[in-house]
Image (cartoon, grey):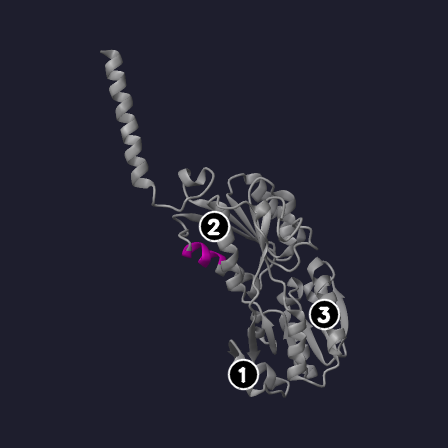
């Protein structure tokens, strides 16, 4: 009788387990690891500094996760940190993600943070975004096959097309000033891209390196040029207003590398939409969480479609007007 009773109990337990599994199978996204059974997926978000472009990546990433079925609170939770351009804080915040040991994935926004994350976190996927040149930053072995636990999206900007835009709005321009951070690998890369493009377009590049955001306005003031070009440099973009004021005083246009900077007062750009970049990064993260791909073999992605952004108020302040065909082409016109 004892044996028979034990078999009855075992059968009852097995049947209950099957019922529970059937009832719970479709309530949350399929994710790898213990999080699928234990609760929401946990994602650490590490951002290097606050400025509209990088903030838009976070917005787009969360939107993309929600659209994929990862509702915040129920299916996913976020641990958000921001280094505010302090390198010691940058290293510490990703180190904490590594030591906590309870993350399913880390989103690293901007090159310095992606580099720190790649060095500290080796046992879970690290997905970067807003990194101009992942190869130069030594984040991946190749763009097609990253080779480890790190992959993501690049915000490589179309520098030649952006400088061609300057020739359209100010044909007489001969010299372009670039203020950039000496501490950011990708900024030096963009300066070289600008020099290469400028040589083809009959322009010369005058550059000034800075070590902190507080130096941006003074550096810009020291450049005697016909226009400014602002790369996707976190130190410069976070202090963009100082450069914009200098450009306004000099009555010269500012071509930025991103659309958010045009919204803030740059004159124009063919630029990336950083919120869309965040959504694209989320789509990669979802595949990793579901086990549909591995970071080592997931190619780095780049948004290839650029959009024209113009700021008519900024143009008026320097005594310039946009051609009608350019205004009709613009995806966004800021006033």
Q: Which mark is residue 194?
A: 3
**Please, what secondary structure does the residue beneath circle 2 have?**
helix
Can residue 64 be seen in the rendering of this structure?
Answer: yes
Residue lying at the far top in this picture: please name it.
Answer: 1
What residue sits 44% from the left and 43% below the top?
Answer: 31
State which quadrant residue 195 falls in: bottom right
State which quadrant residue 308 falls in: bottom right
Q: Which mark is residue 42?
A: none
Instruction: Please give the residue where the numbered disc 2 appears in the rendered image.
Output: 286
Q: CA distance from mark 1 to mark 2?
A: 38 Å
Task: Point out residue 174 in the picture as x, y percentages from the top left corner.
Answer: 75, 81
Task: Point out residue 328 in the picture as x, y percentages from the top left corner.
Answer: 52, 83
Taking 331 as reference, is 217 left or right? right
Task: Point out residue 116 in the picture as x, y percentages from the top left corner.
Answer: 65, 48
Instruction: Please give the residue where the numbered disc 1 appears in the rendered image.
Output: 327
Point out the image quarter for the N terminus.
top left
| Magenta span contains residue 66 | yes
Q: What span is in magenta?
A: 61-67
Q: CA distance from mark 3 to mark 1?
A: 25 Å
Of the numbered discs 3 and 1, the one sitting upstream in the chain is 3
Q: Local crowd at mark 3 within 10 Å, few (<14), some, or many (≥20)?
A: many
Looking at the picture, tell me which residue is in the foreground, 96 or 192.
Answer: 192
């Amino acid at each position: 009788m004892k044996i028979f009773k034990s078999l009855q109990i075992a059968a009852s337990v097995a049947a209950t387990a099957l019922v529970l599994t059937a009832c719970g199978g479709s309530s949350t996204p399929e994710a790898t690891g213990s999080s699928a059974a234990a609760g929401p997926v946990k994602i650490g978000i590490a951002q290097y500094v606050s400025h509209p472009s990088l903030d838009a990546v976070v917005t787009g990433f969360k939107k993309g996760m929600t659209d994929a079925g990862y509702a915040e609170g129920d299916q996913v939770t976020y641990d958000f940190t921001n280094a505010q351009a302090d390198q010691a804080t940058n290293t510490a915040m990703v180190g904490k993600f590594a030591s906590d040991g309870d993350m399913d994935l880390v989103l690293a926004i901007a090159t310095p943070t992606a580099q720190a994350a790649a060095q500290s976190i080796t046992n879970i996927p690290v997905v970067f975004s807003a990194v101009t040149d992942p190869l130069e930053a030594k984040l991946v072995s190749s763009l097609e096959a990253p080779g480890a636990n790190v992959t993501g999206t690049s915000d490589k900007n179309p520098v030649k097309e952006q400088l061609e835009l300057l020739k359209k709005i100010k044909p007489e321009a001969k010299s372009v000033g670039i203020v950039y951070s000496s501490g950011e690998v990708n900024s030096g890369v963009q300066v070289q891209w600008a020099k290469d493009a400028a040589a083809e377009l009959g322009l010369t590049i005058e550059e000034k390196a800075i070590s902190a955001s507080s130096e941006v306005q003074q550096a810009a003031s020291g450049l005697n040029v016909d226009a400014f070009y602002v790369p996707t440099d976190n130190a410069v973009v976070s202090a963009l207003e100082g450069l914009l004021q200098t450009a306004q005083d000099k009555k010269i246009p500012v071509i930025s590398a991103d659309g958010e900077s045009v919204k803030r007062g740059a004159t124009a750009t063919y630029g990336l939409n950083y919120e869309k970049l965040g959504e694209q990064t989320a789509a990669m993260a979802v595949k990793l969480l579901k086990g549909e791909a591995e970071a080592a073999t997931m190619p780095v992605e780049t948004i290839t479609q650029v959009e024209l952004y113009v700021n008519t108020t900024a143009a008026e302040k320097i005594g310039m007007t946009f051609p009608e065909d350019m205004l009709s082409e613009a995806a966004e016109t800021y006033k």
